Image (spheres, helix red, strand yellow):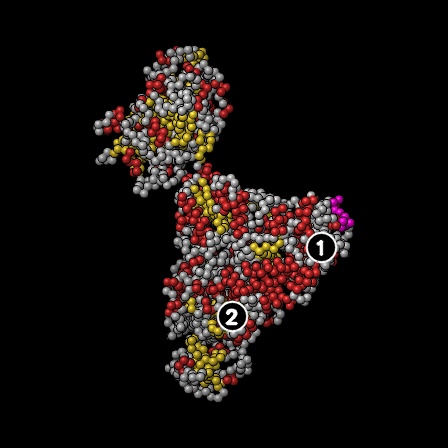
Amino acid sequence: MGNSYAGQLKTTRFEEVLHNSIEASLRSNNLVPRPIFSQLYLEAEQQLSSLEAGSRADNEEEEEEEEEEEGSESSSPPVSYQVKPPPEGCCTTDGFCQAGKDLRLVSISNEHIEVPSGFLLVGAKSPNLPDHLLVCAVDKRFLPDDNGRNALLGFSGNCVGCGKKGFCYFTEFSNHINLKLTTQPKKQKHLKYYLVRNAQGALTKGSVICWKGAEFRGRQSSTSTCSSTLFQLPESSGLSGSTSSEPLPPANPSAPAGTQPTAAAVDHIPSTAAFSSAVYNGKESPKQQMMKNNMSALTRPSVLGTLTNSGPPKKRHKGWSPESPSSTETWNLQPNPQASNRIKNDGGSLSSLPHSALVGPASSPMVGSGEPVSVPDNLLKICKAKPVIFKGHGNFPYLCGNINDVIVSPLLYTCYRNSQSLSRAYEQYGASTIQPISEEMQLLLTVYYLVQLAADQVPLIEDLEQIFMRSWRESHLCEIRQYQPAAPQPFPQLPGPIAPVSSAQLPWLAGLAASSCNDSVHIIECSYSLAEGLSEMFKLLMEGKLTKTNYVVIICASRNRAIDSCIVITGKYQARVLSESMLSPSDYQKEVNYQLVTGKVETLGSFFSTLCPEGDIDLLLEKFYQENQGHISSSLSASANKPTAVNGAGTAVCTSYEIERHQIRPFQLAVAQKLLSHICSIADSSTQNLDLGSFEKIDFLICVPPSEVTYQQTLFHLWHSGILLELGLEKEHLTKQRVEQYVMKLDAEAQIKFKIFLQNSMQNPHTLFVLIHDHAHWDLMSAMHSLYPQTELSTGLVDRLLNCREVKEAPNIVTLHVTSFPYALQTQHTHISPYNEIHWPSSYSNGVDLYHENKKYFGLSEFIESTLSGHSIPLLRYDSSFEAMVMALGKRFPRLHSAVIRTFVLIQHYSAAMMAVCGLSQMKNYTSVETLEITQNLINSSRQCPSGHGLMVVLRIPCVPLAAVAYERLYNVRERLALEDNFEIILGNPNSGITIGKHFVEQLKIWQKIEDVDWRPQTYLELEGLPCILIFSGMDPQGESLPRSLRYCDLRLINSSSLVRTSLEQELGLAAYFVSSEIHTEKPVVNDVLESDPEKLSSTDNEDEEIATEGSTSEKRSPMKRERSCSHDSASSSLSSKASTFCTESSPPQALSNSTEETTNNYERQKQKVDKGAQTTISKHLPPVTEQLDMKQNIKSTQVSITSSSSPPFSSSSSSSAPTHNSFILQTSQCSMTKASKQPPIVFLPKLVYDIITSTDSSGLPKSSSLLPYHSVMWASSFRPLMSKMMTCTEQSLYYRQWTVPKPIHMDYNNRNEGRMDTFHPRRLLLSGPPQIGKTGAYLQFLSILSRMLIRLTEVDVYDEEEININIKEESDQYYHQPGDMWPDLETFKKMPFDYTIHDPKYEDASLICSKLQTTDSEDRSVSRRQDDMYTCRQTTRMRLSKYAAYNTYHHCEQCHQYMGFNPRYQIYESTLHAFAFSYSMLGEEIQLHFIIPKSKEHHFVFSQPGRQLESMRLPLVTDKSEDYIKSPTFTPTTGRHEHGLFNLYHAMDGASHLHVLVVKEYEMAIYKKYWPNHIMLVLPSIFNSAGVGAAHFLIKELSYHNLELERNRQEELGIKPQDIWPFIVISDDSCVMWNAVEVDCSGDRRSDYTWTERNVSLKQILQHIEATPNVTHYALIGMRKWSSKTNSAEIKEPFSCCHVHDFIMLNVDLTQNVQYNQNRFTCDDVDFNLRVHSAGLLICRFNHFSVMKKQIAVGGQRSFHIKSKVSDNPVSISPAQYICAPDSKHTFLAAPAQLLLEKYLQYHSHRFFPLSLKNYSHPVLSVDCYLNLGPQIAVCYVSSRPHSLNISSSGLTFSGLLLYLCDSFVVASFLKKFHFLKGATLCVICQDRNSLRQTVVRLELEDEWQFRLRDEFQTANAKEDRPLFFLTGRHI
């Protein structure tokens, strides 16, 4: 703040404002000067420069030299008073005179005191003895009379102690009696009471001395300055300013012992705990008081305000130094925010406290102190309102007497206290530099806030809190911005900002402020306690002197303690609103009910009847009914009866009727997808809170509030969405009873339905249950608080059911809260993670329409926008005449609740309006223009539509008993007026269904084409088009939707004192509406004027359209832009209201003109005055001129039958002065219902609510958004920033999560864990979106897509391709086995020929392998091959995963938890690394492999005993038989598929014990180990990091043979023969997902007859079946078919084949000892190996009855090899033609293994090497000892060079080429000379280097038959260090 001294004014800004204000007061009588602090703090925030320069009210400057004259009443602040030092040796004890005699009343009350004649005994107050009176004798001439007048100036008094007489100056006298004043002594201040003798003769305190102008004490000097005295007083122990050293207020002697709470309990007593026994007779028990005082240093924020003032007095040069004790240590007392939060009262708006806690002091948790204050009798009768007393700072006196006529509230006290606890957000600045706002400042700002309130405004706590916040921020802006950690100083650091106002200056400044407000704020200053100020206030009230005063501020600023203050609301309107706002909803209902039941409202009724000069309204109605019976009903209900007749006659019927059925809009789909992505992110997180993979289906339960209409509405949506059938929960022919199982009303019967839901969730662990809590803000009562008997049964149900342990812990229940008002679920203790909130998306982003919809949503922001200037249609309005009448009646009937008064007035208005419309024109003086407009449009609407469609008017009456009264009254009036067939009146009670008359039910059935005889509307949506008044009752709307025919939403009766954001927004949410976006509602439209009777008030049908008038027939009509009154008062567009608004300002609104023409002309004249030239062109709104009929046609058209559709689309009012009686000018192209559905409804609000909704705070947000968000939450601190207009929904949520806490009655109250994340429930989501926007449709759509996703999760895409090259198979009639044979017969099988042809569809683009058998018919192969499909996607089909599927890492279920490594016995990741070495001659070196073996799998291995070295992997015996054991170890080579590889074989093996080894590359070891901690890993040596699958197969096979040898040796020692050791291993691909078996039924008559079925079986069953094959060890390779949906009988007729096997094989490592996989290969290595095995004479058997399904996996495997340039990192695609190059050329080298480049090149470009072979299938390429894929257009013939190998007979075959690939020493020249080649055939020799290439040519004598050229040498495009392969090509000579 810049200044270090408390008492000075250093800032020019404050001085300037102060003097300007004083000067303005002095100069002018009529000018109201602006209050000082409103200029300083209530304006918009100043720039930083002005902040630094001014706005500091910390010190005052003018008094340093001037002295105030004694007795003068100056308007300057009080001056510090210097006490004259007492004479030496005299007594200075308080309560004694200087002669040492006791003067205290308690001591000398019974003593005889001589009183000279003309003198009176009076009691003087000493500031140091607040609870004692000192007895003095004073000459009564110097005392005032009863009226406070006629007291002589000066003083004459005697001391009754020592008897000294003749004191002529009160200063002298005060010194003598040791008053020890720090301000100028004044008799008016210190002589307080007359003293009188009671019956016993004892002296007692009598009446208060009535000094003149006590009510203007603010102008007098105070007798006490800062709470720090100049000297350290001897009596005061400790720091003079410290609150903790105050004397304790006297304990209440009569407090019963049982009322004292324990100290621990006090921590948690909120102010609402009026139920608690700790509060006794409006006072806290003594123990509590003591505790409060003891804790004050920590918890009472006002201590800081006190300490702030413990600085120096004004005259700083008189000896005060910064080191003085009063200013040092005290600053170390920081307020503890946590402590103060714990005993915090309920903050929020003035409505946030329940009635029971506040009404009357009997339940007020105030500290009472001092003498009691008596509340006068008949206070309410005289004042016409109960004053509301808000306790402010300090102690509050006891109230006694007529305490029912006052209300005491702690709300302001809470606000003050909260504003002083620095929020954690500001703690970083350090308490020593930045201090909270002082108490004096708080009070002064409060006064200025009250001063600037208008007469019809009510104070809002939120406003005050923001003022405090802004004041604090401005005064500390420099410190906040420039704060740096201060360097250590020799002296303690000074407090930064010293409080700007001292307690001495406070009353004077407050009085100065109040002087400008025309007495609406009145200041009473008192010296000793608030009691005297309250007594004085009551006295003034009783005398009627406060009639113009709305607020009385009572300040007690005494010398050595903190200020006491309270604020009394005496304004009738304000007191009524505030007192009613303190009623809880249930108390409000009880109060109204009580007034209705006890007949208190009858006075209101009798008053109404006196208003009507024609007599009682009921008599008028009866008279009207008798006179018009039988006449009016026929004319008025004609339209209502017409539809049936019209339909029968076949004439025009309104075709615009439609009820919208369930359809998904783009927004809803987007929200559903957002919900789904949140569910997926929960599932994907590492917390494993939701395992989506384990769920097969969806089930759900929707919880709705106990409103019958909402329940039926949800059933309706559910039925029409088709979701139950889609999820498979129900079959066709759905019944309503079945649908009801899925929707639960939260009423008494809910628990039964919920119990069933919970049982289902427990019984079906594989079903995901979604618990949808719709309208989730409705009942958030804690279940613990709902156990009290007085609460309803249904309250607390949400907590009891949805928060029960079963729901929280069930892993298959997801809870989704759905609400339009999520604020109550966004507190510091919420269960919902901020990451699990889904907010409805906005339709626009940066001006781009994100989701194109054909409808525009009208919600709160659009309604508010329509009230801004520049918009032609204000959709929000208020009714000023209604408000005026209510206010007048409120003063007349102070004891009636305003809800009762408002309801009765509005019913009266509606009744009068209905009578006026029906011809009793005199009644329009007894209604308001707005009500008349509503009624007229309602009654006439059905007449404008040929089918009788009309408008809906919603009349919102929250209180159910009042709604019943309103219904009864309006129903009777309607009947008397014979309107019962014209419109319906519906009483909408939340607990019951809809009841409407039979006549209207029939109409609805005709419109909706319903045949069902018993049909009744059950939702408001089904009332589409019904002209009706819906009386909507219930304290809160509960999610009911209203139809599109809603035209008026009359909210004038909502509980406007309940200022809570949720309450206000949900009331306005009733009117939320979708409008077709093609219709631009803001563009004026020419309107039709409805005039049925010249006597009736004229009005338009659609008040928001424009009025078109015609001057003459030839003139073009021109629509006029609508003008509204500036006040936003209703702004209805009935002509009459315009006339009254614009023309007849002085005339009452009842004086309305009766002719259309006159009114229109009035309007037009005024319009021209107001807005010349504002008329717009007609072309936008009217048809071409040719269609505009002249006046004659227009009049003719009005006489056409109502049902005629030939009248023009736009009609105007007639300008003839006498329109035809009963003629209608109609727009028949659209009925009024249709027009209503194209524009949002019009909403009428109470003025108070209208002002709050339409005013904005400094952030630009509507004021309503800064209100307390919900009843059962409170602000965490008053010290919070404003919300910002730019905040997104997410930011708003985070704001509420930081700044609100639940009250104890809130269900989240106990959910706290010091801010740690684990307070959030992992499976809880919150969907929020504006009301009526389509959230139900969105969450139903979410269920649909979630179900589809789960099905998708339980499905996989498996390859589904027919076998290829079937036509090349030998078609022989010979079958070796019977179709039903289970195992092959060895001898038979040996006779079966080997089928060289590849049939696996994955090799569709591979070279055909020729054998002699196929040469004959392979000519046409090129035709059968699908050449065009070679590179297209492979065909897949979607399959549901069976229970025997293999899974990837995303699958989690209870059964396989242990299998996956989540075994409690073993620590996760607990595994050991073991090296395993063996030598292999072909590689020429020892191979070292590493095993990673988890602890849980060590039993599969043998370790050496001393060193735990891995010795071997255990192998079973051939003879072993076990049902639960798979003998063959399974090896799965894998790369790049740590997440997606199907390594979880637990379910596939059906839980059987098996050994499964993952074979991984060294660089991938860590990631595989992370994902599969419980799997055995075989880690390949690092040299194989870039190798292909061939290397893995090679090492698996070699390792397995080596292990077999080790096991044979080990078990031989145990006496087991080597041949008995099981020799098989399984090599499986990592994409094998399921296995199938064909079951053949051969029960037919002939052996060839059989039927077969294929079903999914476990891998265990298949492996055990194969392992049980007779003579199984004689087979080298065993495999199975690849599954295809197109498998035919011919393929499985032979159960076993001798052919190629792929993907999943059982390999006999013993028999294949000498046959190796090629470790260099990347592709086709299995075909190559199959050919080698066959040529070695070994048996390959394929079981055709078994098949394997392979999943399509888009990552890893072959795809993990990317061929890219070695030079640049740019991912440029390189064509296969570039994979080879000439040696020594400058070709770009590639970063890929040479072998891969070779294989890929040959696959795509082998025709360059073998031109003669292209499509020449009868002359294949001879491939020696290997199979390489040369592409699909070249056939190859495989031969083995090994001695004794099986080869095809090549005699008669001529080859078109020869391929020699890395040929070994078995290939010799003589072997090659056996084969014959075509002339020009080509040769390709491939070797490791150029040297071996030449050696091979020489060794094989190739130059004898082949011609070579130098340019025919090539190499793979590898750098030398990457060891390229070299080729040589030649031509056959």
1931 up-or-down from 52: above or below: above
Q: Residue at x 59, y 62 (%)?
A: 902
Q: Is residue 206 above or below residue 1774?
A: below
Q: Is residue 1189 magenta?
A: yes
User: Which residue: 45% across, 62% down?
Assistant: 272
What residue does disc 2 label? 405
Whole-percent x, y for residue 1175 in the image: 71, 52
Structural crowding at the residue carrying mark 1, measured as other residues with C-alpha within 10 Å and reported as few (<14), some (14–19) or many (≥20) = some
Residue kind at label 2, given as amino acid type: Asp
- Work out whether residue 1253 or residue 514 is closer to the camera in this orientation and state it: 1253
* Res 20 seen here: no
* Residue 53 coordinates in the image, percent (x, y): 52, 62
Relative side of 1019 to 677, left or right: right
Q: Nearer the viewer, residue 512 or 1680?
A: 1680
Query: Pointer 1: what residue?
Result: 1092
**Magenta stretch: dominant secondary structure:** helix
What are the residue bounds of the magenta stretch? 1186-1196
What residue appears at the point 49 percent right and 66 percent down from the top-left corner?
359
**Are the residues flagged by discs 2 and 1 in contact, CB closer than 8 Å?**
no
Q: Residues within 10 Å of mark 2 (few under 14, many from 20)?
A: many
- Mark in the foreground, 2 or 1: 1
Is 312 covered by the magenta stretch? Answer: no
Comparing 563 with 716, the one in front is: 716
Q: Amino acid at mark 1?
A: Ser
Classify mark 2: helix, strand or loop.
helix
Against 215, residue 434 (above or below) is: above
Local secondary structure at mark 1? loop
Quarter that holds the C terminus = top left
